[in-house]
Image: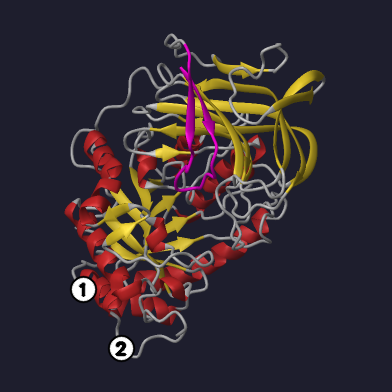
Amino acid sequence: MKHILWTRSLSPGCLLGMLASLALTAAEPIPLAKGHVLFQADFEATNALQAWKGSTRLEAGFQSRQSLVVERKPGASEPSSIVGLSLPVTGVRGCTLSGSARIKAANVSAKPNPWNGVKFMLAIESPTSKAWPQADLDAGSFDWKRAAFTARVPEDATALTLVLGLESVTGKVQFDDVKIVIAKTPPVSPPVAAAGPPFKGHNLPRLRGAMIAPNIDEASLRRLGRDWKANLIRWQLIRHLRPGQSSSLADYDPWLEDELKKLDAALKHCERYGLYVVVDLHSPPGGKATASGYVGSDDRLFTDRSCQDKFVEVWRHLAARYKNAKPIWGYDLANEPVEGLIEEGCDDWQALAERTAKAIREIDPQRALIVEPAGWGSPDGLRDWLPLAVSNVVYSVHMYLPSAFTHQGVFGKTPECGYPGLIDGKVWNRAQLEAALQPVIDFQRRYNVRIYIGEFSAIRWAPDHSSYRWLKDVIDIFEAHDWDWSYHAFREWNGWSVEHTEDRSDNAPAAQPTDRQRLLCDWFGRNQSPSW
């Protein structure tokens, strides 16, 4: 085992760490047992800092003599002050880990980005992926408080590093009672592939369509279904609150009822214009509003059992309400679920999805249940996901890779980049897109299941019409693997609109169809309509 010092700034897409190592005796394999303590430190020993290399010291701790201190003063030459400790990965591959600590902060400056600031984090590496699960901690000053996070270790993980400190901010932070334990182990007998043709939930060769906003009108549904020949829409049950505000259980039902009335009114138009409908619970109970204001599938959904029970109750209600609704193809249980922290007594997403699916099956035995993996519904999320022990499930991911290309300029000024080409230090082309989707391909083949790409898009102002080239390549891949898909999005925000030109300053629909619109319409033109 080696102890590692991270001395440079980290980022969400890559850890720009400079590593310094201390050689130690290799650890024995750790038995795979829930509750096994992988690492624990209270910093009370006389040599408490021996394993930690870097600028750190000891001060009075949480109800104790000592804690580990990291400080970065204004004007410091290095952008971050980070220490790290390599943990043994043998024996924990495929496990879910729970990290907890007591943390105190003083005068921590504002975060340049949401992922910066006080770091209590694991850096997980494998040949195919990297991940940085971490506790969500505020800037400013706060007294001793508990911080925690949950992390999944891939089956092919090669390195596991505990990271503490301050990233791209100044201030002082103290750590005490740091603990990493095994919260969940892999199943002893993984599921096997289902026999026979995979369940689709429809009798058409393919579903191809678009995600829409819930304020869509009949004219737009007619345009999409009758004129463009799409045969699918993904309908968002989406809530907007102040950024950072959590969804309240007290007013959830009135909000949901208002949204369902919009869906009820639209279903007759969907039936008229040949559009299957995916009901997407974009804003489950207990979610927290993002920076743009919409409520996501995170926050208390995995830390509050009452929110999880409400989630199951909501889906029971939806299943009863729409059991006989002809146009509805399937129920997308939660949009892009995020397990930043799974509190004791709460289900992880795998268990909550299965509990919810079984509740729906008691009411509606046939409808397609659409399940996205944890980790924002990303393709990589299917790498260690397991099929639910429920019938008629379709598995879904969202495709926005590489995000530096697809989301350029969405969240502020970012480097302009085209496709195909060098993006974030890697050459992206069709082969690389397919490599990014390989976990989905493998999951489909391993378990003989149907795949649905619920969202995919590239921002319209990508240079030199490159959003068209990216769209063409990803759709070709979807089609090659027989996946249903819905483009993000039709008549929602014009940044994703194929009816608008590549000129960011032009917010009016194009006078003539864009190359992206013609591309979608070409594929929609190959659709068959539902039998009704």
- Residue 28 position, x and y percent, is 43, 8
- Residue 133 position, x and y percent, is 53, 37
Q: Amino acid at mark 2?
A: Gln
Mark 1 to mark 2 CA distance (whole Å):
15 Å
- Residue 291 position, x and y percent, is 61, 59
User: Is residue 417 shown to the viewer in this render?
Assistant: yes
Residue 22: in magenta span:
yes
Residue 522 shows which numbered tag? 1
- In the picture, measured across the screen, residue 230 lies left or right of residue 31, that is left
Q: Amino acid at mark 1?
A: Asp
**Residue at 37% over, 64% down:** 457
**Residue at 38% over, 70% down:** 270
SS assignment at label 1: helix
SS assignment at label 2: loop
- In the picture, measured across the screen, residue 228 lies left or right of residue 78, that is left
Asked where in the image residue 313 lies, by quadrant, the reply is top right
Residue 512 shows which numbered tag? 2
Q: Which residues are magenta?
A: 1-24
